[in-house]
Image: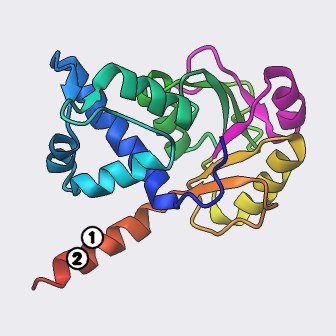
Amino acid sequence: MKTAGIPAPAVRRLSLYLRELESIWRTDQRTVSSKQLGDALKLTPTQIRKDLAYFGQFGQAGIGYDVEELITRIRRILGTDRTWNVLLVGAGNLGMALSAYRGFAKKGFKLVAVFDDDPSKIGKTLSGAPGLHIQPVSAIPAMVKEKDIRLAIIAVPAESAQGVASILVSAGVRGLLNFAPVNLDVAGNVAVSAVDLAVQLEQLSFQVGAGV
């Protein structure tokens, strides 16, 4: 599928559509209109139809969308119709929390390896990932090749993140979920999604404060 020219917000909204559709499916509702989706997500029906149109033809006039079919097609577009092996770098408090999160597995993301540069942690296991022993960062290239890992989660301090990212990219990882509060300098063919919890709280404080 050609993705050039597709706005990033439209791609992000696909995940929202998928989550809502999966919720609808669990209620045994088998068709849904763009208006129903829009009302649930506070978006206009026009916006939803426009977003989906970037990826092909969906739904039928007067009938709406077949929920199961739309779930299947969005999963295929997002690449979550298969299992992705994922590694985690950083076995601190955040790493432990991330390893215990079951939502990853439900979406097809399987945590297969954990790494850290603290010698006192090597060989131990995270409570959320029983069976996975913490390995040294130097073992990343071999594991990426062995497990065909394309995606990685970075949960290390800011000062270590760039070095870790460089190792991951050199090893062949092409998608980074970065929890470190720093911008990463990587090649253009590497996708980076940043999660800065402090920034998110800043945005909330602005929105709340603006109404005071």
Q: Secondary structure at mark 1?
A: helix
| Amino acid type at mark 2 | Gln
Q: Secondary structure at mark 2?
A: helix
Q: Split into 4 quadrants, where in the image is the N terminus?
A: top right
Farthest left residue?
A: 212
* Residue 26 horizontal/vertical position (percent): 21, 19
* Residue 107 horizontal/vertical position (percent): 47, 27
Which residue is the site of mark 2?
207
User: Which of the two residues, 115 or 162, is positioned nearer the viewer here?
Assistant: 162
Which residue is the site of mark 1?
204
Q: Residues within 10 Å of mark 1 (few under 14, many from 20)?
A: few
**Position above or below: 152 against 147:** below
Q: Is residue 76 left or right of residue 32?
A: right
Give the residues in magenta. Answer: 125-153
Whether residue 100 appears in this view of the structure is: no
User: Which of the two residues, 99 or 28, is positioned nearer the viewer here?
Assistant: 28
Residue, x 73% and y 60% (percent of image)? 160
Residue, x 86% and y 33% (percent of image)? 139
Q: Magenta stretch containing residue 53, yes or no?
A: no
Query: Which image quarter: residue 10?
Result: bottom left
